[in-house]
Image (cartoon, rainbow, N blue to C red):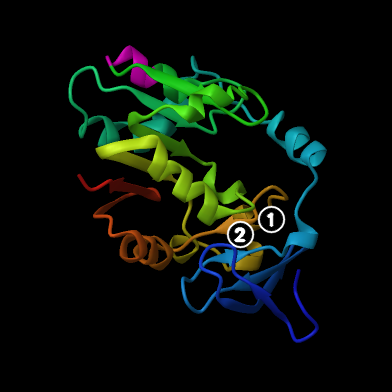
């Protein structure tokens, strides 16, 4: 929750963030330490509102346009994998299209989603890779979730994230569709991922379309 002085604690690094903008019905804060922009806790959507929004998503694995969109993450991440590598699609949505793409390519991939595939036993295993497409911007506790990713991936494994970066947006923040989605509560910049690189000692690669690959150190 923000205080009367217009500050709010950052859910990623714990820094003191200042009010940055108002978009749709949300106040947005920006952290000077890690550059994360986020919505304060008292303005986050309810689980019911979240799922109602997700139910409108079109994630058909058979849709060529959607598969082309997912290729932005699939291609660079799959190029890092050894034959038979196993993975987890974290935040798969109602249709696990990305998990299917990896499986079809010879990389068996499970799908986890808090609403559509809440198979918590999958979070007790280790994987060679983890894919997180258009999900990290929904996290209420991004630091906890990123640290969960690190536990889910074996040493030497890969974490692939796809999310839109506000420093690459074509429109001002308050006019940008990404900031006007009620379920988007954390929006990242390249500098935010660079903070994660430094904080956790992870080498990272940056690819077009908001794709970041982290390798867990051996």
Count of marks placed on residues? 2
Magenta residue check for 139: no
Q: Quadrant of the N terminus?
A: bottom right
User: Residue 84, image x and y in percent?
Assistant: 23, 17
Residue 196, above or below 19: above
Q: Quadrant of residue 52?
A: top right
Classify 194 as above or below 206.
Answer: below
Which of the two residues, 158 or 61, is positioned nearer the viewer here? 158
Q: Magenta stretch: dominant SS?
A: helix
The local secondary structure at tag 1 comes to helix
Is residue 102 rendered magenta in the image?
A: yes
> Which residue is rendered at x = 35% and y = 29% of the image?
127
Q: Is residue 25 visible?
A: no
Q: Which residues are magenta?
A: 101-106
User: Which residue is most to the front?
Assistant: 124
The disc placed on residue 176 is 2
Q: Position of residue 50 (x, y in %)?
A: 74, 40
| Helix, strand or loop for disc 2 | loop
Please rate how many residues cluster around mark 2, counting C-alpha atoms within 10 Å: few if below 14, some from 14 to 19, many from 20.
some
Query: Where the C terminus falls, by quadrant?
Result: top left
Residue 74: x and y in percent read 34, 31
Residue identified by numbered label 1 = 180
Viewer-nearest residue: 52 or 12: 12
Residue 172 horizontal/vertical position (percent): 58, 68
Give how far apart the Cα atoms at labels 1 and 2 are: 7 Å
Left or right placement of residue 3 versus residue 104 in this view: right
């Amino acid at each position: 929750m923000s205080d009367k002085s217009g500050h709010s604690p950052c859910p990623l690094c714990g820094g003191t963030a200042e009010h940055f903008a108002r978009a749709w019905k949300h106040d947005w804060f920006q952290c000077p330490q890690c550059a994360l922009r986020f919505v304060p806790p008292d303005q986050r959507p309810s689980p019911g509102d979240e799922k109602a929004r997700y139910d409108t998503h079109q994630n058909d694995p058979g849709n060529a346009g959607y598969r082309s969109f997912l290729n932005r993450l699939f291609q660079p991440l799959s190029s890092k994998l050894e034959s038979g590598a196993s993975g987890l699609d974290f935040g798969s949505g109602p249709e696990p299209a990305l998990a299917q793409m990896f499986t079809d390519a010879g990389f068996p991939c499970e799908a986890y989603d808090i609403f559509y595939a809440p198979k918590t036993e999958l979070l007790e295993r280790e994987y060679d890779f983890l894919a997180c497409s258009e999900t990290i911007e929904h996290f209420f506790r991004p630091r906890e979730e990123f640290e969960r990713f690190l536990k889910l991936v074996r040493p030497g494994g890969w974490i692939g994230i796809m999310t839109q970066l506000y420093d690459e947006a074509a429109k001002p923040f308050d006019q940008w569709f990404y900031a006007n989605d009620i379920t988007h509560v954390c929006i990242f910049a390249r500098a935010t991922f660079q903070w994660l690189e430094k904080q956790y000692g992870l080498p990272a690669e940056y690819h077009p379309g908001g794709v970041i690959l982290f390798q867990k150190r051996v």
